[in-house]
Image: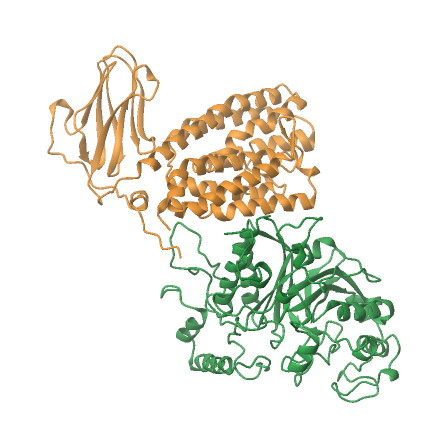
Amino acid sequence: MRAVRLSALLAAATLAAVTGCADKSDAEGGAGDAIRVTASDDACKVSKPEFPAGHVQLAVENKGSQVTEVYVYAPGDRIVTERENIGPGTRVRINAEVKAGRYEIACKPGMKGEGIRQKVTATGGSAKAKLDPRLEKAVAEYRTYAQAQADGTLPKARKFADAVRKGDLEAAKKAYAPSRIGWERTEPVAESFGDIDPKVDFREDGLEKGQKWTGWHRLEKSLWHDKKITADDKELASQLVDDLEDWRGRVGSAEITPTGMANGAKELLDEVATGKVTGEEERYSHTDLVDFHANVEGAQKSYELLKPVAAENDPELAGELDRQFAALFKKLDEYREGDGFVAYDTVGDSDRKDLSDGVNALAEPLSRLAAAVVGKK
Amino acid sequence: MTAKAPSRRSLLGWGGAGLAIGAAAAGGAAAAAGAVGEDTRHTGSRNRAVPFHGEHQAGIATAVQDRLHFAAFDVTTDDREALVALLKEWSQAAARMTAGKPVGDGAVGGLAEAPPDDTGEALGLPPSRLTLTVGFGPTLFEKDGKDRFGIKSRRPEALIDLPVFSGDNLDPARSNGDLCVQACADDPQVAVHAIRNLARIGFGKVAVRWSQLGFGKTSSTTPDAQTPRNLFGFKDGTHNIAGTDDRALGKHVWVSGKDGPEWMAGGSYLVARRIRMHIETWDRTPLKEQEDIFGRDKREGAPVGRSREHDKPNLRAMPPTSHVRLAHPDSNGGARLLRRGYSFTDGTDGLGRLEAGLFFLAYQRDVRDGFVPVQRNLARNDALNEYIQHVGSAVFAVPPGVRDGHDWWGRGLFTEADGSEDAEGK
C-alpha cells in the first residue's frame, strides 16, 4: 500500500560523505589552493564556482568601504561557517570542512541583510541529485521562523529574569509562561544542540545525581511551590538569560532537513502527549496549556512549510492533517482565559481525556508526514 | 503482502521444529473441515487460525480462547463516511490479523522514515485462534439526542438501555461505548496486539473509552470440557450453550430474520459487565457457606445432592438464595445466555486488595428476555451479592458475520435496502 520511491532527498541527507583533501595542485595567486573571495560594497566575487569537497579555505579580502561579514550557507541557509567584523582593507582566512553539495557564499556589507550571494559547488563524493527547491525553501523559511522565535524570546526572558532579580514574585509569575512560548514552538531545534536543553528546560526528575538544577522549572518551583525568591534564584535567572542567548546565537547553524522538520513536528506532539496533557511539565505553575498550544503551533508551522510537497505526494494525509490541526486548536480555544489559558489543575479528567484524544488524532497522521515528504505513496 | 513481510504462520513454519510445522498442518486441516465448536486444547491445533469470514461473527460460538482484550470506543467524528471507512479498514485489518498476518505493509522492511503499519509485537507468533468481534452500542444510534450518523431509525428494539439493577455501582468511565471490539486468543500478546492496532488505525475517528484484559476464561462453549473455575474457586456456568448446539444457538443466541431489524439477522446482543469480587472477604468464608452460596460442591462442581458437575441440578434442594438456582433457566422462564466471561486482575487497589473479578460477557438473541430477567432475579436475591459488585456495564448489538473480503462490519446497517452504500455519501 505504501510503496515509496526514495527520492534524492534521502540520499542527500544521509549519504553525503566528506571526501579527502582538496586538490593542492591548483595554485592561484598568493592564496594557494584557497578560494579567493573579494568583497566590496556592491559585489562578492568568488574565484572559482566549483571546488573539491573536503577541507576548504576561503581567502577573503574586503575592498569595500564598510565592515563586512562572509557566510558559507548549505541548502536551507544552514550556516556552515562565518566570519564577522571584516574591516575595510583587511584580509582574513576562513577554514571549513565541506561535504559535496551545493552552497552559497554570502558577503554582507554593513553586516546586515541576506547579503550578496554566489552559488558554488563542492564536488566529489557520491553523485547528488538536486533537493526539491520547494523543500529547500521550506527549510530556509523554517530556519527564519526558528530564529525569529529565539529572537522574540530573549526580551520576554529578560522581563522574567528582571522580575526574579527584583524579588517581585507576582511579576515573575506573570512573566514566566510567556517567556517559554518561543522555546516551546521550536523545541526540537533547541534540543538538537544537546547542551542547552538540560540547562534551561529540565524538570527535577530529569536530573542526574550531583547535577545542579537550573533553568525555568527550578524557578517555577520557587515561585509557585516555595513561594519565595532566593539569592540563588536571582543568579539562576541571569544564567537562564545567558543560556537562551547562547541558543539564539546557534539557531542559524542548526542542522535542519525536511524530514527533520517533519519528525520535529511529530516530536512536538510527543511532548504534548507525554508531558503536557498529563500536567507533568508545569506541575507547580499549571501553565501546561500555554506550552501545549505553543508545541502545536510549532508543529503546524513545520507542516505548513512542508505542505506543498507533502500534499502532492499524499493528498489524503494533508487533508487529514488540516482537519486535525484545526480540530485540536478548536479544542484548545475552549480553555482560553485572558491572553493565556486556564490553569491545567482546573481541567478535569474527562476534559483531559478529550484533549488527549485530540492529540492522538493529530499525532498519528503527523507520524506519516516524513514519509510524505520523502516520496509519493 | 510481499515476501518482506511474512505472515506469522509462515514465520512459524520457517523457524519452528517439525512439531510446530505438524501443528500448523493439523490446524489447517481443522480449519478446512469448517468445524467451529471443537475444543482444540488437546488436539495440537491451538495455534491455528479461526476463519474470520462467515455467516456469524467468530468469537461467539467459537470454542472459548484462553485470553481476552476487550475495548469499548467512542466515535469522535460526526462524519458518517469517515466511520464507514473505518469499519472497512478495520474489517480488512481483522481479516489479516486473525489469519496471523500483520496489518497493512507489515511491521518491518518498510520505509525508514515512516513508522511501520503494524506495531510488530505479534511477529513470530501463531494466529492463536484470534477472533475479533465487533458490536454497536446504543449511543452509536443516538447520543445526547443527536442522530450523528443517520441511523437512529435503524436501532434495534432489542438494543435497550439496560435498566438499573439493585446493587449496581457503575463507573461511567468503565461503562458503555459507541463501539466495542472483543479480541480473544490463546496468546495474550496476540489479543493485545489486535486491539492496539485497531485503536491505532482508529485515531482521529474513534478513541478508546475503556478496555479490559481477561487472563483466564471462566466459561466453556464445549460441552465435554471441564468448566473453568472463577476466582472464587468454583465452576460456574456449567450448562452453557455449546458452540456446536445449532438448535440452542438458533433459539437463544442468533437473531433471526423475523426478529428484525433485517440488518441484525445472524447477529446477536452482547452484555458486558465488570464484576468486582471481594476476594479477601470471600476467602474468610467457611467452605459450607461458600458451597451454599453457589449451590454446588467446590471439589467437583456438582449441584447440591448430585455427584458430577454435569448432573441435572435439583433446584428445590438448593437454598433459595443460591446462585445456581437463581440463574438457572427454570427460574427465569427458560432464559439462556451464551456466556464467555473472563477472570481479570488489574493489580491491587489502594487498600492492598486484589482489584479482581469477573468480566462477564453474555451473548443472546434478545437482551429483554435474556440478561435482564436473569440479572433482575440475581440482583434481588443472590447470596453472592455480599461478595461482588457490578462496577461496569455495556450493551451492544453485534452484527452478523463479515461474509468475504468485499464485505465489512456493519455493511447492513450502513447500506440502504436497495444496496446503495450510503444515502448521504458518494
Marks counted in the figure total 0
- The location of residue B16, given as percent across then percent down, is 43, 76
* Relative to A242, residue B281 above or below: below
* Left or right: A112 as drawn, with respect to B358: left
Residue extending farthest bottom? B307
* Relative to B201, residue B59 above or below: below
Q: What letter labels the chain drawn in green?
A: B
Residue extending farthest front? B418
* Left or right: B394 as drawn, with respect to A191: right
Image quadrant in which you'd find residue B193: bottom right
Which quadrant is the N terminus of chain A positioned in?
bottom left
Q: What letter labels the chain drawn in orange?
A: A
The residue positioned 68% from the left and 54% from the top of the image is B139
- The location of residue B15, given as percent across then percent down, is 41, 73
The residue positioned 40% from the left and 38% from the top of the image is A306
| Colour option used | by chain
In the foreground, B397 or A293: B397
State whether residue A192 appears in this view: yes
State whether residue A187 appears in this view: no
Image quadrant in which you'd find residue A82: top left
- The location of residue A270, given as percent across then percent down, is 52, 44
- The location of residue A206, given as percent across then percent down, is 56, 42
